[in-house]
């Protein structure tokens, strides 16, 4: 039957040759309440198809660049993959006995006397380096509270300057901070007259990286907190004013709880970002044991030492942690996040 | 749903088709060289070193291209080892025609068939005469027996690379500071108790070294660690010990000689000769360069940097020899070689270029002149040690013969008694241990184990555990590791 | 100067600034109080009283305000100096000589003679121009197509009806949870087999298919645009694609511009992926990789000159497009 649309764009069935009205005028058979509408209009189907066509490009990209590599990575983690020993496509090796290694790579990550130390240390480093997240958030919140005072002048200049490190390239920042922390000629050592080798001591390296990352993240957190602070309605503050609340009380009891969406967002993004930190290991403190993160481990044993099995096992574990964290954060968010 | 099924299937097949097309289309790119219709040989050459060597190589290659105008060579250079190895690893089997590999990397490439055995283009006898024997055989490997060395009767023995250069280590000392402290110490002492400068031909023993360091340390006011760093491999080799048997199948780290060498190193830490590890002060090269230490170890590739960075006078001595029976002063030797890709179409031409780079006098002289290497050729030994041609940019260190002795001494001097080989030199060399195994990652782990990073968590250098106990704890893992690598090698 | 003296001087300077600002503000507040109490009160006596009380209370608070404001200014100034100082130091170091930059005896703040030629040398020693060219190739190849595809995807999710929409949305968004490290190795292997390592393709190809976070951002934005326009267009017989082009894009250009800027900065600063696929000296390496290659060299001032040059375009972009970075647009994608 040909589709006809009247001026309103609504489909009507074409008149039949014998003049009968066909199904027009008859009600469709009874459908259960609340069920999906089974009789979708042709228009809807067409729209759905076109929409699907639009997203199919992204779907292809997702399948080819994300799904398939993730599946391959999981397979690698159960194998002895080495691109020199097994240079052809994965499918050809699925039957090869020498290729499969069972859970050996995972076991190696935690129990091999030599690999496990490096892996566990890289986990420790990654976790310790995440201390820059709450520090950066606290600093950002403080700065945002200070900047959101109504009678402060030069606000945009301050904002501009504090946000500067976020825009600069991480590589350039890594090198300039490395110069500041240098043992023999670094500014920090010379200003305080000490001769501390920041990069040979594990704890000092971690401290240096935390300092650098906190400095770099102040701008980003501050900006988001400013937006959050601005969205807190003035009536709350005025009401608190009438009740005689001090500034400190106002901050803690009004501002802080009401910006929890921003806090939550920053916390999640900060943790996930820091879990995947790689730049510091290679730019700021190369060769230092305090800066070797999990992603560095994956790079070192995967790309550099060609031990794909071990690196894939580590990356699968990392992915599980990141996914679990994301899901957990979103699930628990309604407990302590104030939603408008 | 049917319509969607059609769409989904269309989308998925489009994705697969796209991937396949991309794969096929891009498969054509090869790094290999070829000979074109006019007979010009297009060759790709990859190498790595620090930036100044790149300039050198450009000069050599240009000279080569002038002498052989039918060659067109493209150089692909990397500044440091990790970037270079990452690049080479990333090329899969599309390797450049000629590229450099270090001795602890090439065995994996040979086993996996990525580099070519080009012994048919090489005249081994001629090469053996020209360069030191150990250098000539540095990249000869037998994939069947997994042994190094050249045996011209065995067809499986392959020649995988011309030697680029040999990098032996020597004990480096701060002559200015040494003389200073030595004078202070020698005042008022009878002649037989006095200290003299280290000799270029007679190595210290372990005990003598500790003795000299302790005495001179006493003469320095303030906190002072006489030795900025001591090379572990050299200490082990110099005590007639090794990590494993020559075919790398059985570990030998629990042998008495090995333990004794580790104990010597431990004494260096416990008696305050080397600064404690993980401390806040720099305990390495920078300490030596800034004149805060007496001893360090140096290889010829560092000459150029030290000429720029070191302001005092420094010199070389042979590595200390241990008290074990049959021990000679043996330093670690690192090397790199020119290997040819197995997929190369122009192996003969690549071999010709490699031979030029390895044995051409002009390039050897240019390299040692710029302070980057010692010459490969036997004929140039005297010229280098004595600077008879006067081309060295800087005469330091005076005792360059120490380096030559290390290389020279690691040849196999065939005596008249049907091929029994004996080392006749007091100073010899031995290749770095990573060379003998399929993968050299265990080397880092070994150092870290001794440092307390292993599962026992106790550092030998900090005195938390004795050397013997630590090595006994590591021995089973070491054996496991060797077995694993043997298995890969044999498969 | 001894380092302790320098530190003491800095602390004293901070305190001095604080006191100065405080007195300036207090003086201003005093003047304000005088002006208010001199102005005649108008209206009701009670109102007047109330007004006077209120203004008095305000002014009283202004005394406290001066203190708090002075404190705030000082704190912000301190933080700003801390933030900007590394950049200034980078600039200063880049014009020193090598000896001045690595002087172990004392700090050289200002070079004796500025080595501006470092900025010229940097282009040939670091081959920054090649790096710049490659970075721009990556940017130009990835941004237009990627943004377009993402916008299309967002349009489909936001404005069109799609069967199992939530399922597809979750399916695609799950890609956000997968870290780059886990797809790195297989992707690397694929590119190795295809012979595409050491080229720019591994950096460009994934962006052809759109970017999930960008799509999400656009979805938020598009949800804020009323649907009536589209329905009107549909009535007039406009196809979906055309309505996307003719209606959606003109309304969205602000969000698109912001995302383009973010994408530009992101690709410019990207180090991980290029450092893996592009070897250091290859003719295809991007700016950040060039910096990394050169860092082994002992010539520090040259390195920092290069680093500074790398940062300058970003600063310019940041200054011009501040709205995108710091406005609420950046966070929620909702206008205003």
Image: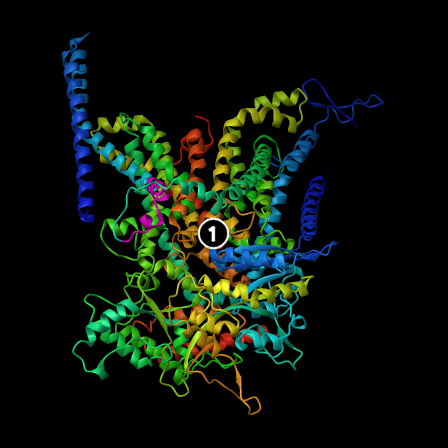
Give yes or no for residue C89 being in the magenta stretch: yes
Q: In which quarter of the image is the N terminus of chain A?
A: top right
Taking B117 as reference, is A225 left or right? left
**Dot 1 surroundings within 10 Å: few (below 14), some, or many (20 or more)?**
many
Residue A265 visible in rendering: no
Residue at the spot of label 1: C293
Closer to us: B203 or B56: B56
Q: In this view, does C178 lie above or below A39?
A: below
Q: Quadrant of residue C150?
A: top right
Taking C222 as reference, is B194 left or right? left
Q: Mark 1 lies on which chain?
A: C
Residue A205 horizontal/vertical position (percent):
33, 56
Q: Quadrant of the C terminus of chain A?
A: top left
Residue displayed at 56% across by 43% down: C172
User: What are the residue bounds of the magenta stretch?
Assistant: C87-104
Residue C274 horizontal/vertical position (percent):
52, 48
Residue A112 horizontal/vertical position (percent):
45, 69
Residue C84 horizontal/vertical position (percent):
33, 38
> Which residue in the rendered view is the most extreme toward the bottom?
B417
Q: Is residue C14 above or below residue B191?
A: above
Q: Which secondary structure dominates the residues rendered in magenta?
A: helix
Closer to us: B458 or C47: B458
Which element is circle 1 on? helix
Residue C181 visible in rendering: yes
């Amino acid at each position: 039957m040909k589709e006809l649309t009247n001026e309103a764009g609504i489909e009507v069935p074409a008149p039949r040759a014998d003049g009968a009205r066909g199904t027009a005028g008859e009600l469709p058979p009874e459908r259960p309440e609340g069920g999906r509408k089974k009789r979708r209009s042709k228009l809807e189907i067409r729209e759905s198809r076109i929409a699907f066509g639009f997203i199919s490009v992204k779907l292809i990209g997702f399948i080819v660049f994300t799904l398939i590599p993730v599946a391959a990575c999981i397979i690698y983690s159960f194998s002895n993959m080495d691109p020199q020993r097994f240079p052809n496509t994965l499918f050809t090796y699925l039957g090869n006995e020498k290729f499969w290694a069972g859970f050996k790579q995972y076991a190696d990550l935690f129990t091999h006397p030599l690999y496990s130390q490096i892996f566990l240390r890289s986990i420790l480093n990654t976790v310790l380096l995440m201390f820059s997240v709450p520090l950066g958030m606290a600093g950002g919140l403080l700065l945002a509270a200070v900047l959101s005072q109504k009678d402060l002048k030069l606000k945009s200049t301050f904002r501009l300057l504090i946000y500067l490190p976020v825009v600069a390239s991480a590589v350039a920042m890594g090198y300039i901070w490395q110069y500041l922390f240098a043992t023999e000629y670094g500014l920090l050592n010379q200003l305080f007259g000490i001769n501390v080798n920041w990069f040979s001591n594990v704890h000092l390296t971690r401290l240096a990286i935390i300092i650098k990352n906190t400095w770099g993240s102040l701008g980003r957190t501050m900006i988001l907190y400013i937006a959050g602070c601005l969205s807190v309605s003035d009536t709350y503050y005025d009401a608190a004013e009438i009740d005689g609340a001090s500034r400190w009380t106002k901050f803690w009891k009004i501002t802080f709880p009401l910006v929890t969406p921003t806090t939550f967002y920053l916390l999640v993004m900060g943790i996930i970002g820091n879990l995947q930190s790689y730049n510091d290991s290679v730019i700021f403190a190369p060769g230092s044991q305090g800066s070797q993160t999990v992603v560095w481990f994956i790079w070192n044993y995967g790309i550099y030492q060609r031990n794909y099995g071990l690196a894939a096992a580590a990356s699968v574990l990392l992915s599980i942690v990141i996914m679990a964290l994301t899901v957990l954060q979103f699930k628990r968010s309604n407990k302590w996040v104030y939603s408008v | 749903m049917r319509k969607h099924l059609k769409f989904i299937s269309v989308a998925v097949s489009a994705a697969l088709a796209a991937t396949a097309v991309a794969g096929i289309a891009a498969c054509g790119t090869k790094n290999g060289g070829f000979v074109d219709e006019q007979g010009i040989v297009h060759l790709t050459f990859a190498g790595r070193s620090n930036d100044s060597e790149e300039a050198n190589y450009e000069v050599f290659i240009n000279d080569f291209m002038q002498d052989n105008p039918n060659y067109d060579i493209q150089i692909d250079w990397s500044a440091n080892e990790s970037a270079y190895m990452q690049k080479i690893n990333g090329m899969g089997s599309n390797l450049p025609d000629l590229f450099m590999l270090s001795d602890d990397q090439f065995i994996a490439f040979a086993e996996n068939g990525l580099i070519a055995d080009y012994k048919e283009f090489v005249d081994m006898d001629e090469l053996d005469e020209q360069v030191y024997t150990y250098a000539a055989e540095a990249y000869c490997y037998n994939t069947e027996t997994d042994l190094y060395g050249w045996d011209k009767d065995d067809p499986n023995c392959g020649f995988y690379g011309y030697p680029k250069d040999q990098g032996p280590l020597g004990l480096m000392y701060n002559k200015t500071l040494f003389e200073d402290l030595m004078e202070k110490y020698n005042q008022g002492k009878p002649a037989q108790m006095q200290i003299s400068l280290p000799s270029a031909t007679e190595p210290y023993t372990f005990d003598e070294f500790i003795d000299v360091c302790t005495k001179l340390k006493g003469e320095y006011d303030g906190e002072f660690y006489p030795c900025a760093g001591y090379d572990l491999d050299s200490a082990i080799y110099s005590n007639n010990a090794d990590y494993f048997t020559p075919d790398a199948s059985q570990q030998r780290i629990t042998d008495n000689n090995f333990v004794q060498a580790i104990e010597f190193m431990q004494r260096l830490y416990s008696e305050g000769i080397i600064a404690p590890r993980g401390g806040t002060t720099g305990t390495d090269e920078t300490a030596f360069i800034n004149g805060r230490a007496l001893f360090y170890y140096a290889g010829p590739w560092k000459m150029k940097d030290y000429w720029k960075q070191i302001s005092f006078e420094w010199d070389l001595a042979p590595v200390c020899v241990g008290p074990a029976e049959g021990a000679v002063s043996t330093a670690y030797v690192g090397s790199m070689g020119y290997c040819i890709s197995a997929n190369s179409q122009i192996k003969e031409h690549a071999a010709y270029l490699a031979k030029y780079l390895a044995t051409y006098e002009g390039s050897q002289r240019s390299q040692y002149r710029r302070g980057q290497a010692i010459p490969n050729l036997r004929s140039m030994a005297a010229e280098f040690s004595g600077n008879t041609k006067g081309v060295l940019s800087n005469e330091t260190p005076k005792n360059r013969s120490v380096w030559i002795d290390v290389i020279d001494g690691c040849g196999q001097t065939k005596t008249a008694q049907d091929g029994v080989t004996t080392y006749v030199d007091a100073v010899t060399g031995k290749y770095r241990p990573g060379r003998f195994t399929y993968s050299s990652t265990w080397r880092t782990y070994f150092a870290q184990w001794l440092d307390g990073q292993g599962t026992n968590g106790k550092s030998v250098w900090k005195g938390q555990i004795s050397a013997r106990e630590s090595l006994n704890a590591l021995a089973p893992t070491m054996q496991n590791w060797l077995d694993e690598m043997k298995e890969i090698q044999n498969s | 100067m001894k380092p302790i003296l320098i530190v003491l001087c800095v602390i004293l300077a901070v305190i001095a600034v604080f006191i100065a600002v405080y007195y300036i503000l207090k003086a201003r507040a005093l003047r304000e109080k005088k002006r208010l109490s001199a102005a005649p009160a108008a209206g009701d006596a009670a109102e007047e009283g109330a007004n006077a009380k209120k203004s008095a209370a305000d002014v009283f608070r202004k005394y406290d305000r001066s203190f708090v404001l002075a404190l705030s200014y000082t704190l912000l100034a301190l933080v700003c100096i801390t933030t900007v100082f590394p950049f200034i130091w980078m600039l200063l170091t880049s014009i020193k000589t090598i000896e001045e930059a690595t002087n172990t005896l004392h700090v050289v703040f200002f070079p004796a003679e500025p080595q501006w030629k470092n900025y010229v040398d940097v282009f040939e020693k670091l081959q920054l121009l090649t790096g710049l060219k490659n970075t721009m190739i990556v940017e130009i190849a990835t941004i237009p197509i990627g943004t377009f595809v993402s916008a299309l995807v967002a349009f489909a999710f936001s404005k069109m009806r799609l069967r199992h929409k939530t399922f597809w949305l979750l399916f695609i968004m799950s890609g956000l949870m997968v870290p780059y490290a886990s797809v790195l190795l297989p992707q690397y292997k694929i590119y190795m087999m295809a012979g595409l390592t050491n080229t720019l393709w591994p950096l460009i190809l994934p962006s052809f298919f759109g970017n999930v976070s960008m799509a999400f951002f656009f979805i938020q934005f598009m949800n804020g645009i009323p649907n009536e326009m589209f329905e009107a267009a549909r009535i007039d017989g406009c196809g979906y694609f055309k309505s996307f082009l003719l209606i959606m894009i003109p309304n969205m250009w602000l969000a698109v511009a912001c995302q383009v800027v973010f994408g530009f900065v992101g690709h410019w600063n990207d180090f991980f992926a290029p450092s893996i696929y592009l070897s250091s000296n290859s003719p295809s390496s991007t700016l950040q990789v060039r910096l990394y290659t050169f860092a082994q060299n002992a010539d520090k001032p040259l390195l920092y000159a290069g680093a500074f040059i790398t940062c300058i375009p970003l600063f310019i972009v940041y200054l011009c497009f501040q709205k995108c970075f710091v406005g609420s647009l950046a966070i929620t994608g909702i206008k205003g």
